[in-house]
Amino acid sequence: KNEVEQSPQNLTAQEGEFITINCSYSVGISALHWLQQHPGGGIVSLFMLSSGKKKHGRLIATINIQEKHSSLHITASHPRDSAVYICAVNADKIIFGKGTRLHILP
Amino acid sequence: GAVVSQHPSWVICKSGTSVKIECRSLDFQATTMFWYRQFPKQSLMLMATSNEGSKATYEQGVEKDKFLINHASLTLSTLTVTSAHPEDSSFYICSADGAVGTEAFFGQGTRLTVV
């Protein structure tokens, strides 16, 4: 079993929909990251969380340390949000989830 | 916030040649940097941990003589893929630890294609 599990693996939604991507982990962590990877591979760091909730524009990230779970939400989704979203945790090393491929249809 | 710059963002090279990828921390000193590799449709996987002024620590299965890592200063680590082979075609990304230790800052990644 992977130490970092993301769901769903793939998600297709209509423009404007509220999107939720989940990340569960089984190891002790000091922080959790949400990354965005666009076609072609470029990585953008969206959030780093150690507790609570962070918001940046239409993106919201939450983490529940007790439940070892984090969610990334996108409000009013747009086709330009189409990308792979990766959850990564700081354990004794950084461990990445396999990513969630998001496709927003116009 | 802290920035890690990775260069080049993409590179195409011929089999047998060597390719160097640079990872720079632009506004902070990073004693530890990490190199990762991602094959298509797979997770990013740690290749090695680069410590300034000392030898890198490689993960199991990563050939240290093929993937040369140099961390000669607190702001620069380089990964050289030597005698590149098509199987080395992959996405490579670096990260650097911030001062607090819980922080991690990621480069933009380098897509290497070996033809």
Image: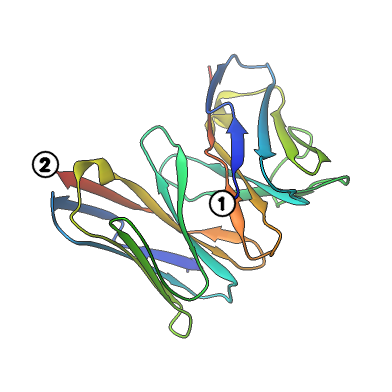
Residue B111 location, x and y as percent? 51, 30
Pick the front one: B113 or A33 = A33
Q: The disc numbered 1 marks a residue on which chain?
A: B
* Residue sitting at x 43%, y 39%: B40
In this view, the residue farthest toward the top is: B14
Q: Say which residue appears at 55% left-offset and 24% top-offset.
A: B86
Residue A55 lies in quadrant: bottom left
The amino acid at mark 2 is Pro
Q: Secondary structure at mark 2?
A: loop
Residue A9 position within the rendered picture, expressed as x and y whole percent measured from the top left? 31, 56
The amino acid type found where label 1 is placed reads: Gly
Please, is residue B3 above or below residue A51 in the view? above
Residue drawn at 70 percent across, 34 percent down: B79
- Residue B69's spot in the image, x, y percent? 76, 37
Q: Is residue A6 above or below residue A12?
A: below
**Could you tell me if residue B113 is visible in this image?**
no
Residue A106 is labelled as 2
In the picture provided, is A7 more to the left or to the right than A13?
A: right
- As drawn, the label of residue B1 is 1
Asked if residue B100 shows in the view, the reply is: yes
Q: Residue at x 11, y 41 (%)?
A: A106
Q: CA distance from mark 1 to mark 2?
A: 33 Å
Is disc 1 in contact with disc 2, using a CB cutoff of under 8 Å? no
